[in-house]
Image: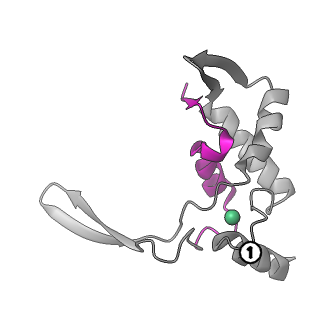
Amino acid sequence: MLARQLLGVGHDRNTTIHVGEFHAAVPYLDIPFDPTWPVEAEIVTGDEIRTVAYSRFPGCSRAFGVLEPLLRARGAVRDGSVGKARTQLVAGRAVIEETVALLASDPAALLCADPGCYRCPRARARLGRLS
Ligand SMILES: [Zn+2]
């Protein structure tokens, strides 16, 4: 079982949620979090070096905290501590399944409300055009 341990942070730092976004295939994955991010990378395989263009980007995670009550309702969160830091142990599968289910019911559920965010307002505008 793949488990995610959040140490002193909330689900707004839970990168497994990005995997759920990809599985849900929300229609804004091509919008980068920041337009200055690289759009390609070199992949080295043995002696071969290939340049691969990114077609999907992990985006803004400011609103990812909306998943915590859903994960808790499912019994998927085990709380603990390390020193003074609060920890949450969560099964990665549960995070991905809850993310996909949430985005199926509301594709905008993980978009933040910050008007200064590069990605979320653009994603909302795209979703508005699709509905
Ligand atoms: Zn945002």
Left or right: 35 with respect to 96? left
Question: For the residue with label 1, is its CB less than 8 Å from the closest atom of ligand 1?
Answer: yes
Q: Is residue 18 magenta?
A: yes
Give neighbour class at mark 1: few <14, some 14-19, many 20+ (Cα, 10 Å): some
> Which residues lie in the magenta part?
1-30
Residue 17 picture location, percent across and down: 64, 47
Identity of the residue drawn at 53% across and 65% down = 57
Q: Which residue is mark 1?
A: 121
Determine which quarter of the picture holds residue 16.
top right
Residue 19 picture location, percent across and down: 59, 49
Check disc 1 and give the amino acid type: Pro
Residue 97 picture location, percent across and down: 71, 40
Identity of the residue drawn at 59% across and 31% down = 8
Identity of the residue drawn at 81% across and 49% down = 102
Quadrant where the C terminus lies? bottom right
Left or right: 48 with respect to 36? left
61 to 8, vertically: above or below: below
Q: Is residue 126 magenta?
A: no
Depth check: give the residue in front, 99 or 119. Answer: 119
Q: Which image quadrant shows ligand 1?
A: bottom right
Residue 37 picture location, percent across and down: 45, 71
Quadrant where the N terminus lies? top right
Depth check: give the residue in front, 84 or 14. Answer: 84
- Residue lying furthest front: 84
125 to 9, vertically: above or below: below
